Image: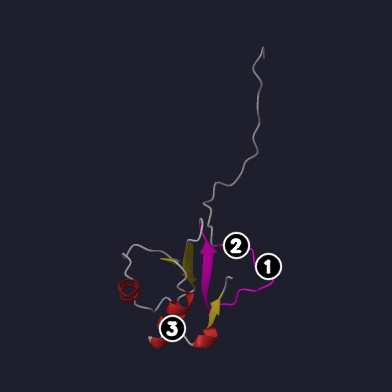
Amino acid sequence: MSGIQKYSFPNRSLATYDPFADTGDTTEVTVQGYIHIRIQQRNGRKTITTVQGLPVVIDQKKLVKAFKKDEEWGDVIQLSGDQRQKVTDFLVAEGISKKDKIKIHGF
């Protein structure tokens, strides 16, 4: 091989990356049945509030209408700004979850 080098690359999984799979909180054990509300810093002073762990039996269209988002969302709801307390109050007021089943994460 004159001047050409042969490179061998290890076979790596091409799985998609889920930014919400690992929150970096290794001290807490995730328990089924809890709704997790997290806040994440974006750029500058902007933040995103995420909601995970909602029960499957919830009417998704009702939530979408209440949160004023379009219907094409997956397992995570993202809201602009710090909406942790408003989301918690909404979930309790609508009877979707009890207050003790909601975990609020973040600063």
Residue at 31% across, 65% down: 71
Q: Nearer the viewer, residue 4 or 70?
A: 70
Q: Note whether 5 is above or below 80 in the view shown.
A: above
SS under mark 3: helix
Q: From the viewer's perspective, is the residue at label 1 or at label 3 nearer?
A: 3
Give amino acid for label 1.
Answer: Thr
Depicted 54 relative to depicted 77: above or below: below
Q: x and y percent of residue 53 in the render? A: 49, 74
**Disc number for residue 15:** none
Residue at the spot x=53%, y=84% of the render?
Answer: 101
As drawn, the label of residue 89 is: 3
The image position of residue 67, as x and y in percent, is 35, 72
Q: Of the residues under marks 1 and 3, which one precedes in the sequence?
A: 1
**Image position, residue 22 (x, y; %):** 60, 62
Amino acid beneath label 2: Asp
Amino acid type of the residue tagged 3 in the rendering = Asp
Residue 83 in the image: x percent, y percent?
45, 73
Q: Residues within 10 Å of mark 3 (few under 14, many from 20)?
A: some
Q: Residue furthest top?
A: 2
**Which residue carries the number 1 mark?**
26
Image point (34%, 77%), residue name: 59
* 7 or 98: nearer the viewer: 98
Q: Secondary structure at mark 2?
A: loop
- Measured Cα–Cα span from mark 1 to mark 3: 27 Å
* Closest to the observer, 7 or 77: 77
Q: Earlier in the sequence, mark 2 or mark 3?
A: 2
What segment is highlighted magenta in the picture? 21-42
Tell me if 83 is positioned left or right of 104 in this view.
left
Residue 9 located left or right of residue 74:
right
**3D distance between C-alphas at marks 2 and 1:** 9 Å
Image quadrant where residue 7 sits = top right
